[in-house]
Image (cartoon, rainbow, N blue to C red):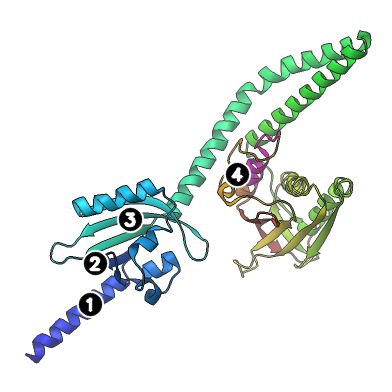
Amino acid sequence: MGVVVLAEYKYKKKFEHIFQFYSSGLIFINERGEILEVNSKIEEIFQTKRNELCSMNVLQLLESLDESFENKKAFIQAVLLDGNAELFSELQNSLGELKYIRIRVSKQKETKLYLIEIHDESEKMRMKRRLDHSESLSTLGQLAASIAHEIRNPMTSLKGFTQLLYKTANEDGKRYLTVINDEIKRMEEILTEFLEVSKPTNNKFYYFEVKGLIEEVVNFMTPQAIMNNINQVVNFRVDENRKILGDRNLLKQVFINAIKNAIESMPMGGNISVNVMEDIEHRDNKFICISIEDQGHGIEEKNLEKIFDPFFSTKKGGTGLGLPHIYKVIELHGGTIVVDSSVGKGTIFKLILPSKVENKSILTI
């Protein structure tokens, strides 16, 4: 008898171990929707402790899903009618992290319990979005390359004719021609942004000092900052000999665009902080973080995931090509971009790039 009890105890412990460390989240609920047991993966997904979850009803968990009332109602009805159902949804956990989860519910025949499996597909969705984004940029590049000359030729002709007409036009005509010239200039700027995004990636990379580049960019942007009542504050928290491997001109344009965006987000003026520091996620000193922090109007959470999509813009008259170009260049350099933003408080763009510290005796380009 003792042997049987011992065998049952070992079987139970083995089951509990499998349940707790299963790769997906597992929840057992009864017919009233009361949560009876959860595994460690569920605690990780929801960022909530087991004892707190087990004091809840499953309907409370459903409330955290980014789904319409109708979809949630249909999901519950499917469970009650068929004993099983599936739902893919976004979830914001207690830390504010956005998760993409697939939920499967099945009724256990032997008992009156329901098993809920929750698969965290966040990384898969992020990879898919990166792939979609790369394909969008590639398509955009092909489109820009194919139409660039077709647009520029007639634009050059139009510009020439307006200049000729301006010499003989009356005051009203000159006013209209000035508007036409301004619009042609705007079209040229848009076309230039198209071509920047579509440039082939056969750039020449070499190591150069990050401090010199940042100082050059900040000095270049100073007149525009002053005109907008903005103060630029630069903090270097890294070795002065820290270098970045990359195309200096491309990265210079990236930092100029990033500061320009920060200035445009601050119509009432304020401070822009440019911080050059070690990337805390990579303590081997092989990455450097250049953060650009503004005190602007911020970015709404619903738009954060769209800001690097081609043609998406919240600015009046914006082309939606500036940030995709920044994304493409940073990705080309083996880096990443992290964006933190609070509406009404401001935005921090963190551009993280591979780097190294070189001995002072080595020639600096």
In this rendered view, identify the residue nearer to me: 127 or 208.
Answer: 127
Mark 1 → mark 4, Cα distance in angstroms: 47 Å
Check contact, mark 1 vs mark 2: CB within 8 A: no
Mark 2 → mark 4, Cα distance in angstroms: 44 Å
List the residue tagged with mark 2. Answer: 30
List the residue tagged with mark 3. Answer: 103
Front disc: 1 or 3 = 3
Check contact, mark 3 vs mark 2: CB within 8 A: no
Please give left or right for residue 344 compared with residue 229 in the image: left
**Closer to the N terminus: mark 3 or mark 2?**
2
Among all residues in the image, which is located at the extreme top?
168
Please give left or right for residue 291 compared with residue 8 in the image: right
**Closer to the N terminus: mark 4 or mark 3?**
3
Mark 3 → mark 2, Cα distance in angstroms: 17 Å
State whether residue 365 appears in this view. Answer: no
Percent position (x, y) of residue 50?
38, 74
In this rendered view, identify the residue nearer to me: 109 or 100.
Answer: 109
**Closer to the N terminus: mark 1 or mark 2?**
1
List the residue tagged with mark 4. Answer: 308
Badge 2 amino acid: Asn
Percent position (x, y) of residue 337?
62, 53
Which quadrant of the rendered structure holds the N terminus? bottom left
What span is colored magenta in the figure?
317-329
* Mark 3 nearby-residue class (10 Å; few <14, some 14–19, many ≥20): some
Percent position (x, y) of residue 192?
72, 31
Badge 1 amino acid: Lys
Question: Where is 178 relative to 265, above or below?
Answer: above
**Closer to the N terminus: mark 1 or mark 3?**
1
In this rendered view, identify the residue nearer to me: 178 or 164.
Answer: 178
